[in-house]
Image (cartoon, rainbow, N blue to C red):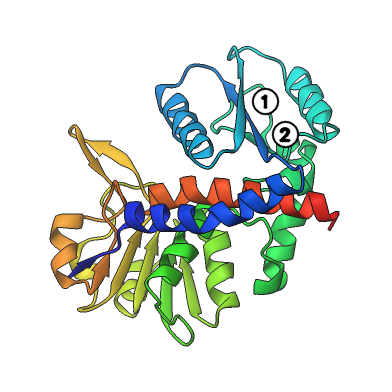
Amino acid sequence: MEILDGKKVSSELFSQLEPRVKALKDKGVHPRLVFFLIGESPASMAYVGMKEKACAKMGIASDILRYDENVTEEEIITKIHELNEDETVHGIMTQLPLPKQISVPKVTRAIAAKKDVDGFHAYNFGKMVLSKEFEHLPPATALGIIRLIEAYEFDVEGMNITVLGRSNLVGKPVAIMLMNRGATVTVCHSRTKNTKEHCLNADMIVAATGVPQLVKEDWVKQGAIVIDAGYAKVNGKTTGDVDYDAVAPKCSWITPVPGGVGPMTIYSIVENTVTAAERLQENT
């Protein structure tokens, strides 16, 4: 069993991103990302803090716009429209979850597609469906998983891959991106009747359900690759969607939680910001 080390890979990818940031700055373009942080959720504040730190590491400007949890939807959308018109801003993202009075679809639609570094806008999602060549701003966690797979040089063409979860944030986009690379993908979700059998048939499992320790040892065939995009606390211990201690001995490769997909997601937000800045500068 070998570890898919997201910390190591993300560090290497950040280094590879540096020349792109420098090239933009040489042209007078200084990449800038704006975060909306609504409320005082410790988890949300921690995630935004990690993204801010990653931007600083790359010399990318980042602003955190903090709002009380009672802020109105109109106020947030008005500010988004203002940032859409600001040529010094290249990326806009709202940290989820949002309070109940704010519609996630409305906020997603409000962000200009070319500044949507989360990759949730219908325009960016739709382009991603077309082909690998149109994956300009895909959802960050899905992109992070793909970058991890690429770093370890797994050839997914023809591989049987089971994706657990169909969310627009992870499951659905990563399934599409894997199909774009020639994989045979099965997507299982809460209505799937034979999830275990689909997993046992998989050369690779990508777990993105948010259900702690869902994937058990008897769900995984010997030598499979397991990528865990989950994150939760169970009895004070950090865990993902996979029962790691039981499953790991059967795997050829597996991601740890934490230290696997998480760092790759942070990296991907920064990569998408650089890509957005490049495309805005080129007006494409």
Q: Amino acid at mark 1?
A: Ile
Q: Position of residue 121 (x, y in %)?
A: 72, 48
Residue at the disc numbered 1: 102
Q: Position of residue 214 (x, y in %)?
A: 29, 54
Secondary element at tag 2 = helix
Task: Please name the residue shown 56% across and 32% down the image.
Answer: 95
Q: State yes or no: discs 2 and 1 in contact (Cβ < 8 Å).
A: yes
Q: Which label sits in the foreground, 2 or 1? A: 2
| Crowd around label 1: few <14 · some 14–19 · many ≥20 (10 Å) | some
Quadrant housing the N terminus: bottom left
Secondary element at tag 1 = loop
Residue at the disc numbered 2: 107
Quadrant housing the C terminus: bottom right
In the image, 145 versus 158, the foreground residue is: 145
Q: Which mark is residue 138?
A: none
Precedes in sequence: disc 2 or disc 1: 1
